[in-house]
């Protein structure tokens, strides 16, 4: 997801334009800090030839004029899709023809939108770039509304008739069968025409809580200015909080926490009413659509069993003794002699200012990903030699990093802001993981089955980060380097596996409060969040003291306004840890299992794709693979520290 290097997932938001698989960075929560220099000299000289660092958008359209011409042609085709309405039930051939035509237009529209979006992200200050991006997005919205009749029409035709058509016209089943199944399983949750129209019309109203919350949080909340021990004056808004919460001086950290959370506490009741309104909307819609609860409604899109969500929460709770061991280690390594406090969670335990120029990032990534085998390596090496990546920061360029794989007939594009630190290297390996996933998918799946879900998307990318960590730990030339890599890997797991699951558990609890018919206020939200924060961080066992003023943290997390979403950060990491373990300790079969998951793209529901690859996310085993990794890294860390 779109992400500033070194920041955690709080700043990540769900896909900006649904339907387009712009895959973004899940936070590389490794925080690079200054220490020593070394190692990268041998590659510096060849940097400029090897890595021009700019993508070539002419693979999409030779000239901006070509884009404009294509845009006009596709706009007409989008408008023409309304003609298909009412034709699908005629016979199998008509249904196939309609699906094929819609697919073709969608593929072309995505290609237009990809170009417009990438061009915009090169330089967001450029007027024509902005206008083109708006046109591209509006085209996708028009496409959505021009085909909004499709699902209702299929549901009216019904599963039996669709089956008959699929038998008569095998291509319908082969290419569009999954999409058809996906529509048909919505039948029990689809209302009558009148009710559907009312709900569609209420959509805007139901979306308001997040808008109000964002205005308050991003624009009107009065953030205070403080003076740090070195004389620096900072206004502690959201960006500066992320930057200064990790400072080495402990009194400064406490001041940062006290000030920042104090600002939120002043609006706890308002923000609580906002979040309660959002969750009320979720609960209402789930009930209206005949789901047993809001969680089931949210997981319906991916056809994800509720037991996956609940197993994740149960397994992370079972793993809290490991997490507490980590927090005790952190206290020791930060040299804290009294109680560890919640404001001690962000500073790095180890530091490194080792540089990784782009050519070095390429070399290391290729080496580190060797366990993935020949085909993976060839695809990666081929991509690295091509002009698919906009690598360096420049004026006006979009921040963060992402891979965009939505131009099916072309190739993936990657945007990075490589600044040669460790976080850049990690992001590089992550985003190229998305790119190879896309390459393997397009090689093996038609366009119609190429849009893989977030649930599977992050697995391969996080796995690349883990293989990178393992490689760097194995080959580190000094004890300090090894400590830095292990510390970073552990910190990643804290931020993703433990913290995101705590968020997921909080989301579940607050929905259940409303589902039981109880009231939800800002005070109650803070109390509930506080209980979880203390439980996860071992407050009662003396592991970490969670001071009550920080328990308003829930108000700061925008993800709580995007449904049950954050659990996928944790499950992706679980899948990544499981496959890393399988591949490193297994053979060809284990590797193929994983590659088949990537090759399968969006051809099935993510839970099924995982299961076919050998892991059942409703069972404890995959989660335990991650906890074993966490424990093993702590063993290594303790051994090094004792030396
Ligand atoms: Zn990602």
Image (tube, rainbow, N blue to C red):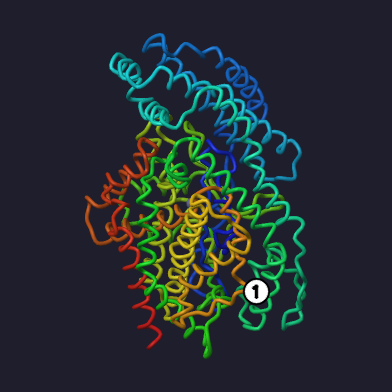
Location of the C terminus by quadrant is bottom left
Which residue in the structure is indicated by mark 1? 257
Task: For mark 1, give the secondary structure.
Answer: helix
Instruction: Report the side of 482 relative to 424 (left or right).
Output: left
Q: Is residue 131 above or below residue 260?
A: above
Q: As drawn, which residue projects farthest toward the front?
A: 517
Quadrant in the picture for residue 448: top left
Q: Which residue is nearer to you in this view: 92 or 110?
A: 92
Q: Residues within 10 Å of mark 1 (few under 14, many from 20)?
A: many
At which x and y percent is residue 92?
36, 13
Residue pictured at 37% horizontal, 76% vertical = 634
Q: Is residue 537 above or below residue 373?
A: below
At which x and y percent is residue 160?
32, 19
Instruction: Report the side of 419 relative to 575 (left or right).
Output: right
Residue pictured at 70% horizontal, 45% vertical = 123
Residue pictured at 75% horizontal, 66% vertical = 223
At which x and y percent is residue 114?
58, 36
Q: Which residue is nearer to you in this view: 635 or 268?
A: 268
Q: Is residue 545 visible?
A: yes
């Amino acid at each position: 997801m779109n992400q500033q290097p070194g920041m955690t997932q709080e700043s990540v938001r769900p896909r900006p334009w649904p339907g387009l698989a712009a895959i973004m960075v899940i936070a590389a929560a490794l925080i690079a800090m200054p220490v020593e220099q070394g190692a990268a000299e041998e590659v510096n000289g060849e940097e400029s030839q090897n890595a021009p660092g700019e993508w070539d958008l002419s693979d999409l359209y030779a000239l901006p004029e070509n884009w404009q011409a294509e845009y006009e042609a596709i706009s007409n085709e989008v408008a023409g899709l309304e003609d298909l309405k009412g034709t699908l039930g005629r016979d199998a051939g008509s249904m196939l023809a309609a699906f094929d035509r819609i697919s073709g237009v969608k593929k072309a529209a995505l290609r237009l939108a990809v170009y417009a979006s990438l061009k915009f992200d090169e330089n967001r200050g450029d007027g024509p770039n902005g206008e083109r991006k708006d046109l591209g997005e509006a085209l996708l919205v028009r496409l959505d509304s021009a085909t909004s009749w499709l699902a209702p029409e299929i549901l009216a035709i019904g599963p039996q008739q669709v089956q008959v058509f699929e038998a008569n016209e095998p291509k319908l089943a082969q290419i569009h069968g999954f999409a058809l199944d996906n529509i048909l399983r919505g039948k029990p949750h689809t209302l009558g025409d009148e009710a559907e129209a009312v709900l569609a019309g209420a959509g805007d109203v139901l979306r308001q809580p997040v808008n109000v919350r964002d205005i308050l949080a991003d624009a009107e909340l009065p953030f205070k200015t403080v003076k740090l021990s070195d004389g620096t004056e900072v206004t502690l808004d959201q960006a500066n909080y992320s930057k200064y919460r990790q400072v080495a001086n402990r009194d400064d950290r406490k001041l940062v926490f006290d000030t920042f959370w104090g600002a939120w506490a002043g609006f706890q009741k308002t923000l609580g009413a906002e979040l309660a309104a959002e969750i009320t909307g979720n609960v209402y819609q789930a009930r209206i659509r005949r789901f047993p609860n809001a969680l089931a409604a949210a997981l319906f899109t991916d056809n994800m069993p509720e037991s996956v969500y609940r197993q994740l929460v149960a397994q992370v709770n079972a793993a809290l003794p490991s997490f507490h061991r980590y927090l005790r280690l952190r206290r020791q390594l930060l040299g804290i002699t009294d109680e560890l406090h919640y404001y001690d969670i962000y500073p790095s335990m180890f530091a490194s200012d080792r540089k990784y120029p782009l050519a070095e990032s390429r070399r290391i990534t290729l080496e580190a990903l060797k366990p993935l085998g020949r085909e993976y390596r060839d695809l990666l090496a081929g991509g690295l030699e091509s002009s698919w990546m906009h690598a360096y920061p420049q004026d006006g360029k979009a921040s963060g990093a992402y891979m965009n794989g939505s131009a099916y007939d072309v190739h993936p594009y990657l945007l990075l802001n490589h600044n040669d630190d460790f976080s850049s290297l990690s992001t590089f390996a992550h985003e190229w993981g998305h790119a190879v996933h896309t390459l393997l998918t397009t090689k093996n799946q038609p366009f119609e089955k190429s849009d893989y879900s977030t649930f599977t998307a992050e697995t391969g990318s996080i796995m690349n980060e883990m293989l990178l960590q393992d490689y760097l730990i194995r080959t580190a030339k000094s004890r300090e380097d090894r400590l830095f890599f292990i510390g970073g890997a552990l910190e990643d797991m804290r931020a993703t596996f433990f913290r995101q699951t705590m968020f997921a558990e909080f989301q579940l609890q607050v929905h259940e409060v409303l589902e039981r018919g109880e009231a939800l206020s800002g005070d109650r939200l803070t109390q509930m969040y506080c209980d979880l924060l203390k439980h996860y961080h071992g407050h009662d066992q003396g592991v970490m003291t969670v001071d009550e003023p920080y328990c308003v943290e829930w108000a700061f997390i925008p993800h709580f306004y995007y449904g049950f979403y954050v659990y996928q950060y944790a499950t992706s990491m679980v899948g990544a840890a499981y496959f890393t373990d399988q591949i490193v300790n297994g053979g060809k079969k284990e590797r193929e299992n994983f590659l088949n998951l990537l090759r399968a793209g969006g051809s099935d529901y993510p839970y099924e794709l995982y299961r076919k690859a050998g892991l059942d996310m409703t069972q404890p085993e995959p989660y335990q693979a991650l906890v074993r990794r966490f424990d093993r890294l702590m063993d290594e860390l303790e051994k090094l520290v004792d030396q």
